[in-house]
């Protein structure tokens, strides 16, 4: 539970009031906001998916399969199960040549809220395992999913802030921040329909 409280306090820094709608397509809205911690922009996605909150949460935390729909995720690996709904995992993110792929070490907690709402909190845990020369460790990687039952499906709010670190300039990283979340949510929808 200590980890959950740490994550919730840290994640609360993601809450923004200056969201700007950047794209709306196929029922998916993508918003951006500036961050106080990095020159990389934070995104928020809002949409509706015809699936139950638990089905969506299961897909998000399915480390063996979420690379099938999550944009640029090459692979993921469970590092430690901390409790029924808490774990630490490693994820490898593909980035364009000539840059080195990125590595994320992430703490994850799935929290059951009132009225069937599920929240997934994610926060980098860069001291969990040592860095290697194979990847560049992302210094910032945190966000949340809020899955709210709605009619025949679920309203999704998904927000994330990720700084790729290394030598990738902020202007280049920011070019992908609108389209990648859009593609990820589309991929999630298609995956859930199968």
Image (tube, helix red, strand yellow):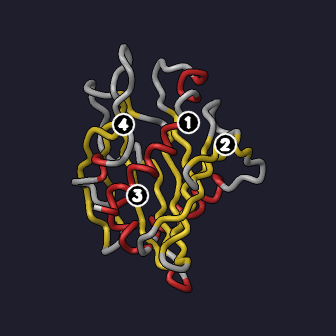
Give the vertical position of 96 relative to 85 (above or below): above
- For the point 63% across and 59% down, which residue is it? 12
- Depth check, front residue: 41 or 83: 41
Q: Which of 141 and 42 is in front in this view?
A: 42
Marks 2 and 3, how far apart in space?
22 Å
Residue 95 in the image: x percent, y percent? 38, 26
Residue wearing tag 2: 32
As drawn, 38 above or below 147: above
Residue nearest the viewer, comparing 123 with 47: 47
Mark toward the viewer: 4 or 3: 3
Mark nearer the viewer, 2 or 3: 3
Q: SS class of the residue under badge 1?
A: loop
Q: Do the residues labelled 2 and 4 touch (CB within 8 Å)?
A: no
Dot 4 alpha-carbon crowd within 10 angstroms: few under 14, some 14 to 19, many 20 or more: some
The residue identified by callout 1 is 177
Q: Which of marks 2 and 1 is nearer the N terminus?
A: 2
Q: Which mark is residue 72?
A: 4
Residue 189 badge: 3
| 62 relative to 55, above or below | above
CA–CA distance in space, label 4 to label 3 = 17 Å
Is 44 drawn above or below residue 81 in the view shown? Answer: above
Question: Which circle's residue, 1 or 3, is located before the other in the chain?
Answer: 1
Labels 4 and 1: the sequence-earlier one: 4
Kindly indicate whether the residue at mark 1 contacts the one at mark 2 (C-beta within 8 angstroms).
yes
> Alpha-carbon distance for marks 2 and 1?
8 Å
Please identify the residue farthest to the front as the structure is shown: 26
Crowdedness near tag 2: few (<14), some (14–19) or many (≥20) residues, C-alpha within 10 Å:
many
């Amino acid at each position: 539970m200590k980890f959950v409280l740490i994550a919730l306090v840290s994640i609360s820094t993601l809450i923004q009031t200056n969201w700007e709608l950047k794209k709306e397509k196929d029922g998916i809205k993508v918003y951006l906001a500036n961050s106080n911690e990095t020159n990389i922009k934070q995104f928020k996605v809002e949409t509706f998916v015809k699936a139950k909150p638990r089905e969506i949460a299961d897909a998000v935390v399915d480390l063996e399969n979420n690379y099938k729909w999550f944009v640029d995720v090459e692979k993921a690996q469970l590092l430690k199960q901390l409790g029924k709904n808490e774990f630490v995992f490693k994820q490898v993110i593909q980035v364009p040549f000539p840059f080195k792929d990125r590595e994320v070490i992430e703490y994850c907690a799935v929290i059951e809220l009132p009225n069937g709402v599920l929240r997934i909190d994610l926060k980098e845990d860069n001291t969990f395992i040592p860095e290697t020369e194979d990847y560049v460790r992302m210094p910032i990687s945190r966000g949340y999913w809020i899955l709210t039952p709605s009619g025949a499906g679920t309203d999704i709010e998904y927000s994330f802030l990720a700084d790729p670190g290394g030598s990738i300039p902020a202007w280049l990283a920011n070019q992908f921040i609108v389209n990648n979340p859009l593609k990820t949510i589309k991929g999630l929808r298609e995956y859930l329909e199968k």
